[in-house]
Amino acid sequence: MTETAVEARLTQEQPTRPLALPLRLAVRQMRSGFDGFIVFIACVALGVMVISAIGGLASALVTGLESQGRQIIGGDIALSRMHARVTEAERASLGSIGVVSESSTMRSMARTVDGAEQLLAELKSVDGSYPLVGQMLLKGGKDLDAALANGVVVEPILLERLSLSVGDQVKIGSAEFTISGVIEKEPDGLLDRLTYGPRVLVSTEKLVDAGLAGPGTLIRWRYAIALKGPGADEDLEALEAARNKLKEKLSASGFTIVDRSNPSPQVSRTLERLRQFLTLIGLTALIIGGVGIANAVGNFVDRRRRTIATMKSLGASNRLVLSIFMAQILAITIVGIAIGLLGGALIPGLLKALYGDSLPIAPVVSVEAMDLMVAAGYGLLVALLFSLWPLGRAEQISPTVLFRDQVGEGSAFPRLPIVLATALIALLLAVIAVFSSDTPHIAAYFAGALGATLMVFYGLGFLVVWVARRLPRPKTPELAIALSSIAAPGGLTRTVVLSLGAGLSMLVAVALTDASLVRELTGKLPDNAPDYFMLDITRGDLEGFEKLIIKKAPGTQVQTAPMLRGRLVQLGGRNVEELKVPAEAEWALRGDRGITYSADVPDGSRIVAGEWWPEDYSGEPLVSFEKDLAKQLGVDIGDTVTVNVLGRDLTAKIANLRALDWESLSINFILVFSPNTLAGAPTNYLATVKLPRETSLAKEASVMKSLAKDFPAVTAIRVRDAVDSFSKVFERIMVAIRVAGSVTLVAGALVLAGALATAQRRRILDAVIFKALGATRFRILAAHAVEYLLLAALTAFFAIGLGGLAAWIALSQVIDVPFYLSWTAIFSALGVSIALVVTLGGLGTWQVLKARPVPYLKSE
Amino acid sequence: MTTPIIDLRQLNLSLESRAGQVDILRGVDLQVRAGQSVAVLGPSGSGKTSLLMVIAGLEPATGGKALVDGQDLRALDEDGLAKLRGQSIGIVFQSFHLVPTMTAVENVALPLEFRGDDDAFDVATDLLKEVGLGHRLRHFPAELSGGEQQRVAIARALSTRPKLILADEPTGNLDGETGRQIVELLFSLHERFNATLVLVTHDEHLAQRCGRTVRMSDGLIVSDTEAEPAL
């Protein structure tokens, strides 16, 4: 009795165990192993691995951030604000909950005493109780208090850049200090700064005495608090209570408050966004791999047609057939998921071991069940999405297959429940992807773009086959063979176009977005961009400063504006914490913004609604708002805006809306107040300096030296250096995105390899027949080459178009950066496409050419 | 005496298998004159198909000498052998071996295209009409019955007007009636084109249609009989 006959008997004999039977039969079917499912398993494993690794890595960084929260913020709670030190009353409030340490940070110029060398430094002042948490390590084990009593301590890079040593004098702004020590490790150095320059640490007392923290200076005062009481550093409730108490007492003080449980909401948010975005890319890889899954299941079903027909002829129902095959597919999916999860769980640890030292936050690697479950869930859904359809066709196979010599392609359409289940899973995936994102509209764009891409390439596959069938047969046999292979029913064309096309589109989109962003950030700065931003010019120095610069470098354009920093606290009479604003506008409500006042419309601005105030305006406080942000924040002309400046609230009415040209890097402010609003506030000036185009580097250095000599307190930030410094941070993020983006191509390559492997036997047989009919090896090689090149080029062409469109939409609609058509990116994509297809196909062709004909001719 | 179109002398074919060397042909001597029809009979594993494959240049002999249409097969490289097949040999397989991605007419035209003939499709169309498939020109193999596929294969084998037709159990995969029709077709075309026919078969009746019968056993020719010319 055959195996299937026994199975059929079991069907009839054991009707009381409906669930056990499909499983038992599935296990028997799987005795032949996972042959033909390698690509299936690899596709599931790759996608699951990427998603779980991204989740694991993000969790490790977030946990790292949280577990080092106390160290990072230098206490349990930290408050900070610009310009204004605490008042006595505020200090008393802080002191009531714990031990307080005061510090401040600002940018300043560090120079050699003769002014020959200078650089931008990150100046930080500390009091005697600093640090409350952790330890400040100085080279040679020096004592911090003693060192600060004698002078300043600096990072080694400053000594190197200014050619100074410990014991030498250094000028910070207009004051002179002795270098009394070298910083080896700063406990809370991480989150204060986007590093523009080396750290210089000074005692607050000395900072104030030297006049470096004068009124209007862009200085941030910071208060770290270590909670009182035993076990306070573990007690989350006490932390929450203390934080709420401070918030209540200091509500109008303009402080930004963070605590050790979330030491940097901005970094946490960035990590979360990055995790969400990379997960979407991982999901894309999984979905592209889905094509491989569908192919594997389709081939599996084809190989089992006779078995299915036999089972049916012996009495197996459609449902039983579907259950048996579904059980096998699920088992294989679980194997893929398990491999993926294992890899995904190992990757964060591996990355930590390799790159842990270069990360600003020490990741705390642990296996988070949630990360694994999310990845496994996505893996399962995608595997089901792409398996159901071919499985649905399996149950439609008729027993008459047994009586036919040749089996046609079969076009059975799955039953309606299968079609609906497939659609439902697709919808579920899209819903999860969109609603698990902080920026659902971006995720929705992404899901829509992915769906559209898959449909375009699916359609393109059909179109290519359709056109190839209708083209007149070329005279050249190589072309004719290539074209007939492309047109072949059930051939490689559709799989190659779909898998390679989708993977490549993603790569092109990432590459073009990347190229546009990099160009925007590192390319030639706009012609009208300034060369320097000058900070902390006092009102008294302003005129002299401008005169000197024009004298030293005639033709220099100097633009100045008074600048303070303030925090938006109310919009339209409502506290900003209560406002629900779109994600892209949240930045404006976080932390401080530069604000200014002006009697005239500032350069680079254009009034688009409302009226500018008269030059001598003295009525109620007015403010001019940037138009796009006003729209996003839901405010309009006539609404009130409250800003906390120097620890007090200022309320003004929106008088007009302005359009800004941000890219010019000229002085732009979101908020420009009428001069009378800020008349009493001590302000310093910000200046942009644009040197004449022909200015040499030596001349530039000499101008800066003269400025440093006469205006030592002015801080000069070279725009090029600042942009480069930001680009370095950006570059690291782009590496992560590029790596994730290339994973989609790896998924495409896997699918391609699977499809080629499946087709290999057929291709060898074809080649053997061609040889038997008189074809030389060159002819066969040429036919394959033409086929692969045509498919690869055509696919790349569409992928470039679609990927370019996606990048253009992302750049122009979401990121707001001009689209740059990078030919390098495009030719790389074309090259990668052709290289992949030709390499994988070439490997196949090599085997085709060296195959011995006889076994194929005899056995078929 | 004219030069034989097939001249095999002490032909050997040995293949390596996991169990060691297997001697498939052990010193075969065979000369076939142009225009002859030869049936090669023998039990399974006697070396019939291998002999045919060596003559076709699809399997290189490991010893002895093999001349086909005056060319020493062992002196030709793979591409030289392919050209020889394209010029002089037509092969009909038991499993038809049509190219599934090509229509009937494209399959038949293919050897002519390889040879560079401009009228490949006209010749192929005529041939298909001749074998009764004028209405199936644009059908793919999967859309044809077994008998129809074998007729396409015969038309393809004859498309280049080869001097030598090699047929490996051409009716092996066909039912009795279809097989008879195919045999009629094969012999009528062999006669019309005056081509040499070497036919590997198990079928004694089919063998009797041939002018000469060669029997093989265990890699050797054990008998070689030529029928009396019919009066």
Image: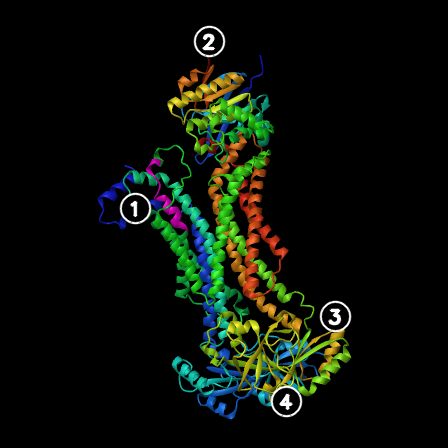
Three-letter code, disc 2: Ala
Per the image, the residue denoted by label 1 is: A320
Q: Secondary structure at mark 2?
A: loop
Report the side of A296 relative to A658 (left or right): left
For the residues marked 3 and 4, what is the alpha-carbon distance in whole angstroms? 36 Å
Quadrant of the image for the N terminus of chain A?
top left
Numbered circle sitting on residue B230? 2
Separation of residues labelled 1 and 3 (CA atoms): 80 Å
Circle 1: residue type: Leu
Whether pointer 3 and pointer 4 mark residues with C-beta atoms closer than 8 Å, the reply is no
Q: Are marks 3 and 4 on the same chain?
A: yes
**Quadrant of the rendering where the C terminus of chain A is positioned:** top left
Task: Return the x and y of residue A103 as percentages of the image width and height.
Answer: 55, 85
User: Is A249 rendered above or below residue B231?
Assistant: below
Near mark 4 (Cα within 10 A), the count class, few <14, some 14-19 or many ≥20, is few
Residue type of the residue flagged with mark 3: Arg
Report the residue marked by disc 4.
A211
User: CA–CA distance between discs 2 and 1?
Assistant: 64 Å
Question: Marks 1 and 3: CB-CB under 8 Å?
Answer: no
Q: CA distance from mark 1 to mark 4?
A: 86 Å
**Residue A693 numbered tag:** 3
Left or right placement of residue A794 versus residue A558 in this view:
left
Instruction: Please indicate, yes or no, whether residue A388 appears anywhere in the rendered image.
Output: yes
Q: Earlier in the sequence, mark 1 or mark 3?
A: 1
Q: CA distance from mark 2 to mark 3?
A: 107 Å
The answer to whether A321 appears left or right of A124 in the picture is: left
Same chain, labels 2 and 3: no
Q: Is residue B7 above or below residue A357?
A: above
Q: Nearer the viewer, residue A617 or A161?
A: A617
Crowd class of label 2 (few under 14; some 14 to 19; many from 20; radius 10 Å): few
Q: Which of pointers 3 and 4 indicates the residue nearer the eye?
A: 3
